Amino acid sequence: MVKESSKFLFGAFVLLVLMPTVCLAAGEPQPLWIYESTDAGVALYHQQDAAEGLLPFKAVAELNIASEQIVLALLEAEQKPLWAPKLKGTTVHATLAANCFQYSEYYTTPWPFKDREFLLLGTIARQGETIVFSAVDAPDRHFRDDRHVQANIHELTFAVIPLATNRTRVEFTFSGDLGGWIPDFVQEIIQKRWPVRFIQALQGYLRNNTLDESERYRLLEKVLAYDQRESVALVD
């Protein structure tokens, strides 16, 4: 019980530490996303005036899946390679709090290009009823795997927005560079085909599997509930 309480309190502390960074980011000019097309129920957007070298995309869909199940699937990072396309492995290097992790995702790329690693610092926050998974490049590069090319994140968020008991809107936003030259056909896959496949794979996995609440999920719920109470108290 003492160990669990310590994790909970440290998680609340991490949230408070990260709040100034989040507020500063919110004050920056937000990118303009332009609707492009819909593929298999997934709306795709491209970013206007994207910086050279970045591969941005935004994908939005409404799924007939409970929001809690989507959160569970994303939270259990070690199981993500079971369903996420091109993801060959995930390693959680450090759990800094119930809502803060340092981890790597390893992706396969077509021959002759080397596979990519995203070495990330990930956080999870509640915004009203929405749960937002976000990540930035991990400042600590100690865990990098030299067998992979290091990819770099400019923006990575996955918002889980409950609409009804078994209806959820998801918004997947990415902007980054893959650490080297990528041919046009691979860029096309990354920006237009891969996000659709990712959301389809997530939906298919959860249609075939009902996930149980894990210890990691229960600790996260405590931290997010605390954060929500504190936000209400500040408004009052």
Image (cartoon, helix red, strand yellow):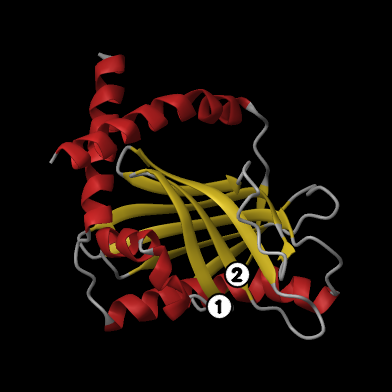
Report whether 11 appears left or right of 196: left
Amino acid type of disc 1?
Answer: Lys
Q: Residue at x 24, y 18 (%)?
A: 233
- The spot of residue 43 in percent (x, y) is 55, 66
The answer for how far apart the CA atoms under marks 2 and 1 are is 6 Å
Quadrant of the rendered image containing residue 59: bottom right
Closer to the camera in the image, 138 or 134? 138
Report whether 47 appears left or right of 37: right
Report whether 155 appears left or right of 149: left
- The spot of residue 9 in percent (x, y) is 27, 31
Mark 1 nearby-residue class (10 Å; few <14, some 14–19, many ≥20): some
- The spot of residue 224 in percent (x, y) is 28, 39
Quadrant of the rendered image containing residue 192: bottom right
Q: Is residue 104 visible?
A: yes
Mark on residue 88?
A: 1
- Secondary structure at numbered mark 1: strand
- Can you say which quadrant of the picture contains the N terminus? top left
Q: Earlier in the sequence, mark 2 or mark 1?
A: 1
Tag 2 and tag 1, C-beta contact below 8 Å: yes
In the rendered image of this protein, does residue 18 appear above or below residue 168? above
In the rendered image of this protein, does residue 223 appear above or below residue 216? above
In the rendered image of this protein, does residue 229 appear above or below residue 110? above
Q: Residue furthest left?
A: 1
- Residue to which mark 2 is pinned: 106
- Can you say which quadrant of the picture contains the C terminus? top left
